[in-house]
Amino acid sequence: MQDRFAAFRHGSFSRYFWARFSTSFATQIVSVAVGWQIYDQTQNPALLGWIGLVQFLPALLLVIVTGITADRFGRRLVMGLSILAETVCAFAILALALSGNFRAVPVLVILTVFGVARAFHGPASSSLVVNIVPKKDFANAIGWSTSSWQLASIFGPVAGGLLYGISGPIAYAIAAIILGFAAFLVFLIPNPAQKKMTENPSFKVLLGGFSYVWKQKIILGAISLDLFAVLLGGAVALLPIYARDILELGPTGLGLLRAAPGIGAIITISYLTVFPIRDHAGIILFVSVGLFGLATAVFGSSTLAWLSILALLLVGAFDMVSVYIREVLLQLWTPDHVRGRVNAVNSIFLGASNELGEFRAGFMAAAFGAVFTVVAGGCAAIGVAALWSQWFPALRTARYLQSPDDLEKSDE
């Protein structure tokens, strides 16, 4: 058994954790409020897809720039400035809501800028954690860092639904204030030591993250597995349709549906921080992704609120297992001087799975209906797990969550 709070013995990590939680919490409030308001005004599922797409494209188009920025400049600085930019975007949405000009096009423009800020935030924040905790506490820090997002995904959607039920502008205002607080916390972190990139920005250096991921088949398999499973099986974008039209739960119910996966995930990560995976990590990864797909399909076909929430709890729980394994492998197998670029590639995979998955779900639901889209997506995620287990045998047979150096020492 490990010390559950080992990472919090370090003050820099405590500030980092609460900054990351606050950022994700505020982002969830904005996401729930914007998604509900746009769908309530238009009843157009395709617009829910556009919300995801405009937040993903900046990360894709800027992947080389964001990764090299995290490696060449201070990751704390980049993370803090990115959150400040997100704060400005939240205030801009607030201004639209207060002025009565809340329309799809201007909101999507602001969300595009928000996506640019998130594109820089992702690699910097993911890479920073390894610079502020000693190696012996790193797995614990990864667990807590990942759980910060999951905690936010529990409380943020509930808060967003409740606040929007009171007033849309109140929801956006509180989100903006929380984002500003998160930026303040980041700048309170002492500037950590970082092995910065020293090479001239040649084409080879710029693509260093892609090159490293391609060579490390375990990392490639782990992050591409998550990419395609969530890209095809993600149902978050369609929750406003389920809350409004299928389950008839209203905006508060939407908050509960959005929170359910986070509750399942936080229960899982609470267990993993105390009892980390010791063996058969690869098999556990593939089984978890398959069960994620099964739980998604159950949710998609359900018309009972209690069953839908239970299925979403399991979606979050099984997804958390794969996220934990992927993040530990990614950070332990990546040298510090290329970490930002590798995390930028990872951010692209995550963005494709989440935001691009929302785009896919929205347009597919417009054509075939929400129920078919979610059920088919869950079945597809099961298929992805089966295929990847055959295509990436090194990942399937991976047993221990250790760095290559540690594996060599254990073999000696």
Image (cartoon, rainbow, N blue to C red):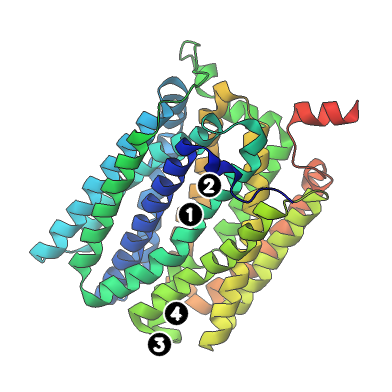
Q: Residue at x 75, y 37 (%)?
A: 402
Q: Earlier in the sequence, mark 4 or mark 3?
A: 4
Residue 90, position as x, y percentages in the image: 24, 53
Q: Earlier in the sequence, mark 4 or mark 1?
A: 1
The image's mark for residue 332 is none
Badge 3 is on which residue?
248
As measured in the structure, the alpha-carbon distance from the residue carrying label 4 to the one carrying label 1 is: 23 Å
Task: Name the residue nearer the viewer: 3 or 181.
Answer: 3
Badge 2 is on which residue?
145
Residue 11, position as x, y percentages in the image: 46, 38
Q: Amino acid at mark 3?
A: Glu
Foreground mark, 3 or 1? 1
Q: Amino acid at mark 4?
A: Tyr
Task: Name the residue nearer the viewer: 60 or 8.
Answer: 8
Can residue 1 be seen by looking at this rendering?
yes
Q: Is residue 91 above or below residue 287?
A: above
- Secondary structure, mark 1, is helix
As measured in the structure, the alpha-carbon distance from the residue carrying label 4 to the one carrying label 2 is: 30 Å
In the picture, the quarter occupied by the C terminus is top right
Q: Judge the density around disc 4: few (<14), some (14-19), many (≥20) Cα neighbours within 10 Å.
A: many
Badge 4 is on which residue?
242
Q: Earlier in the sequence, mark 2 or mark 3?
A: 2
Q: Amino acid at mark 1?
A: Trp
Residue 51, position as x, y percentages in the image: 35, 58
Q: Residue at x 65, y 46 (%)?
A: 326
As measured in the structure, the alpha-carbon distance from the residue carrying label 2 to the one carrying label 1 is: 7 Å
Q: Quadrant of residue 299?
A: bottom right
As measured in the structure, the alpha-carbon distance from the residue carrying label 3 to the one carrying label 1 is: 27 Å
